[in-house]
Amino acid sequence: MTEWKTHHKIFTALGAGAAALVVYAGVKADRMARIGAGYKAKIACSEIFVARRDPRAVVNVEFENIDAAMDMVSVQVNQKQHYVRASGPLGLGGVRAVYREGYGCTLANAGGLHPMPEAGAPAAGAAWPEAPPVSGQAIERIDYAALDVALSDALSEIEANHRSLLVAVDGKIVDERYADGFSRTTPFLSWSMAKSVTATLVGAAAMRGLLDVDDPAPVPEWAGDDEKSRITWNDLLRMQSGLAFGEHYDQIRSDVNRMLFERADSGAFAARASVENPPAETWYYSSGTTNLLSRTLRQALEENGLEFHAFAREAIFDPIGASSVIMEPDASGTVIGSSFMYATARDWARLGQLYLQDGVWNEERLLPEGWTEYVRTPALASDGQYGAQFWLNREGADRPRFFPGLPEEMYFFAGHEGQYVFIIPDKRMIVVRTGMTRGRSAMEAVAPLLAEIYNAVGAPEGTEL
């Protein structure tokens, strides 16, 4: 073989290898860009079309202080056709989020969207009872001046970035505040507060005899699998399924980011996870577990001729008057029960109040007797910090309470960047806080304010708690 032919073959092979590397690098870059673009398209779409915020404010403010790479993702808003498109540099990772009335925004991953039935009009709920300083007769055990100072000072904290604050005592709103650009009619994103709503819907289905939380979860992919078929509804609710899942938001291609911003079927993604530990023996936080719950609940409802959204309205939202709740589905039609629900601060408070009233509203039982106690009973392996899709304020073996100065009986909905519904039985009180706390711990930013609110309200006299 001549030297020229030998060199030619080497250069050809090198060229083919280089081309393959370029293609591989391009595919990898596109996949990485798709996560960032998916995040930006989804959040922008929901904030513009669900929360009805000004598009310029959303695009300019909502994505600050996340990551410098996020600045490289461009956003185009089509207000006429109700969608948002986002893409990375050179058009990499192009993603579209589509708004549908009654269902919010969905990323159009893997092509089209599962058709949804026409959304029924929500029932108009009765207005929240109000007490001073809003109206009506004062509740004597409240220090209104101290409460006013606490909430007024909180809204002036630029770094904490509170967006809504609401305090309800004895089932009456006693104070509420909103940052500029937000109001009592603004729906706020749940992030992981949605997990507590998912548990609530599981409870409503259990009360109707549609499922038993102690039964194995009927996940189709698990049929004939000896390990997975032992995982119960209770294991999923308590985040102790033993299924592998990486809840790492700072890793661009982590399980949670791929599930939320890349995959069309979030529940199926979680169902295919490998088994790391036997069920009930370990605890770790997993949004995949909740989306698997949501999909499995949807399937159980459909087997009984019930549509998920209609069931949620009939069983919970309409009876308590939470008419603003929007549950956003993935492209397969399953509600992303881990992360994507919207509601006004008042309706978030209603959901908390339902638990404060032991699952009863207007003398009608909406959740099984004992369900409230069930969700706030610690998962065995959680070191006392987690119940059934609810966070707890209990001390752990080597861990203080999340909110010092607040009782261990308090339990709460909690979401990314400081979305909270606090249920405080000893004061018969609900506190809602939404916001966008970045660059510091949201829990640490909210804790002093919550302690001030708690201390401004006295214990009810003659009440057995």
Image (tube, rainbow, N blue to C red):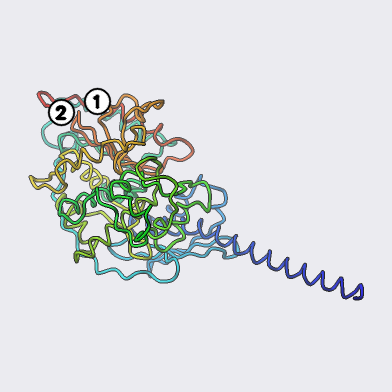
Horizontal relation, residue 36 to residue 424: left or right: right
Quarter holding residue 53: bottom left
The disc at residue 325 is none
Left/right of residue 85 with respect to residue 166 in the rendered view:
right
Side (left or right) of 147 relative to 209: right
**Viewer-proximal residue, 216 or 208?**
216
Q: Badge 2, how many Cα within 10 Å: few under 14, some, many 20+?
A: few
Q: Quadrant of the C terminus?
A: top left
Q: Nearer the viewer, mark 2 or mark 1?
A: 2
Mark 1 packing: few (<14 Cα in 10 Å), some, or many (20+)?
some
Toward the left, the furthest residue is: 363
Q: Decide which of 293, 143 is in the foreground and name it.
A: 293
- Residue 83 can be seen in this image: yes
Q: CA distance from mark 2 to mark 1?
A: 19 Å
Q: Amino acid at mark 2?
A: Leu
| Residue 439 position within the rendered picture, expressed as x and y whole percent measured from the top left | 49, 38
Q: Can residue 105 be seen?
A: no
Give residue 73's quadrant in the image: bottom right
In the depicted structure, whether residue 387 falls above or below residue 212: above
Mark 2 or 1, nearer chain start: 1
Q: Would you place residue 74 above or below residue 345 in this image?
A: below
In depth, the one of 61 and 27 nearer the eye is: 27
Q: Is residue 195 above or below residue 109?
A: above
Q: Position of residue 149 (x, y in %)?
A: 30, 28
Q: Residue at x 31, y 52 (%)?
A: 342
Number of dots carrying numbers: 2
Label 2, secondary structure: give it: loop
Residue corresponding to mark 2:
465
Return the x and y of residue 348 as percentages of the image width and height.
25, 45
Q: Quadrant of the N terminus?
A: bottom right
**Which residue position holds label 1?**
456
Q: Amino acid at mark 1?
A: Ala
